[in-house]
Amino acid sequence: MEINFTNSKNINREQLEILYNDVEWYAYTQDLEVLQQAIEQSLEVVTAWNGEELIGLIRIIGDGLTIIYIQDILVLNAYQNQGIATQLMQQVLKKYKNVRQKVLLTEEAPDVRHFYEKNGFESCDQGSLVAFARLS
């Protein structure tokens, strides 16, 4: 199996739906037009492919100079724990290494915490930062 990574926001709507539904992010697929617009308006999108199959994606928003926000990082269940998410993350961190603020918001789970910590992120409950969010 050869995984290819590309930087492209031009992703087939059906492939997006399959990927987001596979990881049970159904809130995104309730309106596929909005999801596709969000992808297209992102600062950057890096995708992982096995042939013609979209198997992973990381989506970055922000200005790319002082802040990036990792909005989405997801990999099809069948391809998880093979280092694909790490490769997606490392590509982004390498490209934006000079950006001071690299931010993300995610659910609390041991495997999720471990993934982000091994990629150099520090939870706000561990350090001197405070995080606030308002979800509608």
Image: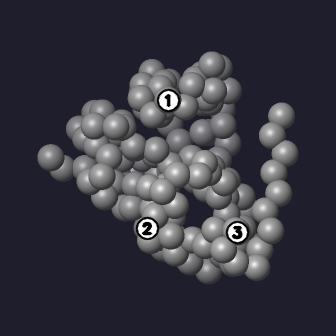
Badge 1 marks a residue whose secondary structure is loop
Could you give the CA–CA distance between mark 3 and mark 2, rounded to whole angstroms? Answer: 21 Å
Q: Residue 54's x, y, as percent?
A: 36, 36
Residue 64 in view (yes/no):
no
Circle 3 crowding by C-alpha within 10 Å: few under 14, some 14–19, many from 20: few
The residue that disc 2 covers is: 90
Place residue 26 in its image quadrant: top right
Place residue 30 in its image quadrant: top right
| Residue ID at (52%, 75%) | 120
Amino acid on which disc 3 is placed: Cys
Could you give the CA–CA distance between mark 3 and mark 1, rounded to whole angstroms? Answer: 26 Å
Viewer-nearest residue: 81 or 11: 81
Viewer-nearest residue: 89 or 44: 89
Circle 1 crowding by C-alpha within 10 Å: few under 14, some 14–19, many from 20: few
The residue that disc 1 covers is: 24
Judge depth for marks 3 and 1 and give the one in front. 3
Amino acid on which disc 1 is placed: Glu
Could you give the CA–CA distance between mark 2 and mark 1, rounded to whole angstroms? Answer: 24 Å
